[in-house]
Image: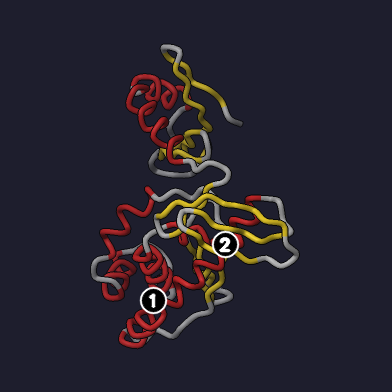
């Protein structure tokens, strides 16, 4: 349940989630601050900490809200476009300057954005496919099926049972290097499932400069 913390007529919306974590994590999500509370930390302590550091959190909160695209905006590889919907039975889209003309029978903008992100991400994957294949071959890792879907809280996943990788279509918004990083991140999980020292050793072999993207990917917006 979303609640509000108010100080000096300024408001931060927040949600506290009880997790079996060793640490407490603060993350802005949608239009609120999501707080994953450590097991032995009280809610009163969290609220007091938030209140004492209100100004710093509020500045980050405002910056976060500014990063939320407007309903008609879509971002492809770090470039912003305005959507222009044209009614048509067959879905297609055409980039024209800073606009995208969308021919669609759908009126739901979220559905339209998902279709565009998925299609564009496929093209991005094709652009780096040969590089990915070469790295996998060099490290004696077989290719896995790659599926695309929209996740609200992660950029990719590896399913050991199905032996397949799933990528978040929202990666179409980012620089293509982040897509490459997430692919390598998930392929490293095919060798080491948990984030152990052995796992990061594998990841470094697949992508020597992975740290640069590992540290900054959480700053990427997962907004549609």
Circle 1 sits on which residue? Answer: 128
The residue positioned 58% from the left and 58% from the top of the image is: 101
**The quadrant where residue 147 appears:** bottom right
| Residue with the most extreme left position | 208
Q: Position of residue 136 (x, y in %)?
A: 36, 83
Q: Nearer the viewer, residue 200 or 78?
A: 78
Q: Quick check: 208 left or right of 182? A: left
| Residue with the most extreme top position | 8
Mark closer to the chain start, 1 or 2: 2
The residue positioned 50% from the left and 60% from the top of the image is: 96
Q: How is the image coloured?
A: secondary structure
Q: Nearer the viewer, residue 36 or 9?
A: 9
SS for dot 1: helix
Q: Position of residue 211 (x, y in %)?
A: 26, 60
Q: Is residue 118 above or below residue 82?
A: below
CA distance separating discs 1 and 2 = 19 Å
Q: How many numbered callouts?
A: 2
Q: Which mark is residue 116?
A: 2
Q: Which mark is residue 97?
A: none
Q: Is residue 65 above or below residue 43?
A: below
The reply to whether callout 1 and callout 2 are in contact (CB within 8 Å) is: no
Q: Nearer the viewer, residue 191 or 74?
A: 74
């Amino acid at each position: 349940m979303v609640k509000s913390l108010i100080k000096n007529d300024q408001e931060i919306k927040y949600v506290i989630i009880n997790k079996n974590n060793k640490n407490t994590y603060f993350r802005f999500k949608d239009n609120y601050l999501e707080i994953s509370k450590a097991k032995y930390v009280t809610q009163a302590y969290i609220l007091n900490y938030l209140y004492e550091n209100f100004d710093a959190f509020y500045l980050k909160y405002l910056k976060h809200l500014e990063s939320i695209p407007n309903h008609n905006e879509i971002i492809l590889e770090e470039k912003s476009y305005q959507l222009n919907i044209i009614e048509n039975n067959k879905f297609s889209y055409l980039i024209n300057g800073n606009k995208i003309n969308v021919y669609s029978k759908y009126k739901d903008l979220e559905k339209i954005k998902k279709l565009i992100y998925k299609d564009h991400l496929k093209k991005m994957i094709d652009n780096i496919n040969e590089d990915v294949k070469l790295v996998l071959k060099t490290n004696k890792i077989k290719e896995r099926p790659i599926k695309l879907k929209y996740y609200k809280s992660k950029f990719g996943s590896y399913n050991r049972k199905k032996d397949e990788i799933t990528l978040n279509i929202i990666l179409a918004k980012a620089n293509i290097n982040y897509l490459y990083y997430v692919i390598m991140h998930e392929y490293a999980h095919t060798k080491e499932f948990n984030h152990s020292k052995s796992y990061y050793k594998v990841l470094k072999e697949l992508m020597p400069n992975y740290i640069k993207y590992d540290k900054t990917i959480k700053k990427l917006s997962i907004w549609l």
